[in-house]
């Protein structure tokens, strides 16, 4: 937890002064006067006589006669906690943690349909044993369903339920469900608290860690666009339990390894070594092994993500090593032509392509490229896709990157060694 004195300044967006954003200030000579009821936040500006006299007549005629500046510090604090047995009746976490003391003993749950089919009976029994009434809204978790229609379904149910302003909803499922439910939470009454409970490896190491919410968007000009509509909206907590991974099929476990491999390549030689030496076994065991290797892989991945995201939650800094594998993957993941790729699979295909770019630029030796390829193949991860052979697809990925990263490609590449990176913007 962050203490109040260490909470970052996050609002206004991008920076707290117009000049720092490249905008002209209201009046460089004017001194803001703090207002009595809000002396730390609201400042009144009036142009001084001297500055008006010095200004060209045309500028003076069109300048504001009065202006106010509002500064507001938005404290963001959330915990990411690894638990054992979240659905064990002896564990009260999901039942009562962060439930306001003056709120009704109830929970509003948004649950992945597949998760509900696997765990629905346990979920009902768990909350009943704690005398907690539940309202359950189930939504499908696949990428095809990551649309505003699902957000609308949740919002409609929230209205009928009458969720209190400080009463957190629980989102239980994979990344799609967490993103959709988070967006609904950010919109309902302009923001209510929510708790993430990821049930897939991919969501445990990725979607549960940051503050992004969102849905895909069908553009009339560009077709279906991944995560084009959304918000930065932090949960109050994320409760993680690797036990959920046991009910995933192998492809979905491997899919989660795509995001873990990404982090290993750009940030952690230790993590890459664990994947290289133990990864295939950990996948077979679905992270349920008796040793601590699976735990260490998950903990390292979460900690790396938090270290990278923590100081840059709102992405003011657009050159991010965690964008590795996310330049071309957004395009090939949404292609309608087979073979279809899941998110982590697409990230891995993109990641190997970028490793090859690193080698072509002499940023890593051939031996490192072979190590990366061999580790990916040993894990059963896809390393190629027909879309990556299409120059038009690659160009589309770079064009989207330039839009998303404000005029620069900002493509992370492995550099120097496995576990280190550099960001480039000159791919032609």
Image: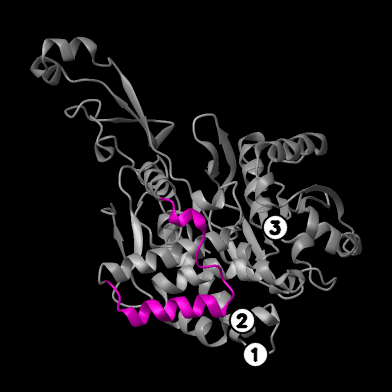
Judging from the image, what secondary structure is the residue with disc 3 in? loop
Q: Quadrant of residue 370?
A: bottom left
- Name the spot of residue 105 as percent of width and height, x first: 83, 52
Disc ID at residue 291: 1
| Camera sees residue 2 | no
Residue 40: image tag: none
- Residue 379 appears anywhere in the view: yes
Residue 198 in the image: x percent, y percent? 67, 62
Q: At x 72% / y 36%, what residue is drawn?
A: 155
Label 2 vs label 1: CA separation? 7 Å
Which SS class for mark 2? Answer: helix
- Residue 251 shown left or right of residue 277 in the figure: right
> How many marks on residues?
3
Q: Which numbered dot is residue 98?
A: 3
Residue 330 lies, with reference to residue 241, above or below; the image says above
Viewer-nearest of discs 3 and 1: 1
* Residue annotated with mark 2: 294
Residue drawn 38% across and 58% down?
Answer: 320
Relative depth, front residue between 352 and 226: 352
CA gap between label 2 and label 3 equals 28 Å
The local secondary structure at tag 1 comes to: loop
Spatial CA span between label 3 and label 1: 32 Å
Of residue 330 and residue 105, the one placed in the foreground of this image is 330
Q: Main secondary structure of the magenta part?
A: helix
Q: Nearer the viewer, residue 83 or 397?
A: 397
Q: Residue at x 46, y 69 (%)?
A: 263
Specify the quadrant of the image occupied by residue 285. Answer: bottom right
Q: Which mark is first along the chain, 3 or 2?
A: 3
Structural crowding at the residue carrying mark 3, measured as other residues with C-alpha within 10 Å and reported as few (<14), some (14–19) or many (≥20): some
Q: Is residue 83 magenta?
A: no
Picture coordinates of residue 250, whole percent (x, y): 69, 72
């Amino acid at each position: 937890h962050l203490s109040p004195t260490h909470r970052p300044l996050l609002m206004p967006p991008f920076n707290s002064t117009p000049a720092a954003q490249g905008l002209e200030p209201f009046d460089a000579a004017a001194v803001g006067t703090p207002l009595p009821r809000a002396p730390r936040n609201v400042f009144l500006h009036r142009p001084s006589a001297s500055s008006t006299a010095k200004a060209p007549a045309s500028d003076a005629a069109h300048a504001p006669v009065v202006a106010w500046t509002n500064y507001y510090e938005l404290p963001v604090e959330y915990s990411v906690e690894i638990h054992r047995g979240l659905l064990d009746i002896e564990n009260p976490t999901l039942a009562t943690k962060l439930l306001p003391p003056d709120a009704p003993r109830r929970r509003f749950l948004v649950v992945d349909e597949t998760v509900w089919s696997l765990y629905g009976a346990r979920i009902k029994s768990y909350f009943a044993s704690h005398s907690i009434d539940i309202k359950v809204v189930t939504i499908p978790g696949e990428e095809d369903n990551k649309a505003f229609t699902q957000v609308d379904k949740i919002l409609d149910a929230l209205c009928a339920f009458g969720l209190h302003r400080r009463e957190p909803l629980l989102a239980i499922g994979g990344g799609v469900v967490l993103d959709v439910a988070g967006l609904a939470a950010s919109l309902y009454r302009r923001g209510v608290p929510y708790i993430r409970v990821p049930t897939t490896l991919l969501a445990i190491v990725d979607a549960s860690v940051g503050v992004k919410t969102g849905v895909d968007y069908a553009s009339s000009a560009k077709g279906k666009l991944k995560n084009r509509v959304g918000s930065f909206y932090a949960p109050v907590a994320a409760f993680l339990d690797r036990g959920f991974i046991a009910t995933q099929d192998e492809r979905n476990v491997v899919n989660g390894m795509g995001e873990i491999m990404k982090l290993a390549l750009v940030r952690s030689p230790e993590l890459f070594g664990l994947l290289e030496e133990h990864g295939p076994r950990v996948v077979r065991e679905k992270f349920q092994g008796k040793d601590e290797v699976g735990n260490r892989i998950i903990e390292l991945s979460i900690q790396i993500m938090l270290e990278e995201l923590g100081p840059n939650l709102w992405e003011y800094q657009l050159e991010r090593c965690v964008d590795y594998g996310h330049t071309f993957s957004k395009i090939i993941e949404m292609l309608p032509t087979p073979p279809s790729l899941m998110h982590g699979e697409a990230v891995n295909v993109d990641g190997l392509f970028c490793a090859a770019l690193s080698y072509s630029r002499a940023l890593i030796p051939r031996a490192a490229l072979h190590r990366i390829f061999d580790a990916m193949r040993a894990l059963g991860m896809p390393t190629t896709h027909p879309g990556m052979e299409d120059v038009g697809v690659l160009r589309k990925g770079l064009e989207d990157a330039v839009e998303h990263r404000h005029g620069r490609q900002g493509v992370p590449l492995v550099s120097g060694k496995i576990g280190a990176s550099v960001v480039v913007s000159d791919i032609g």
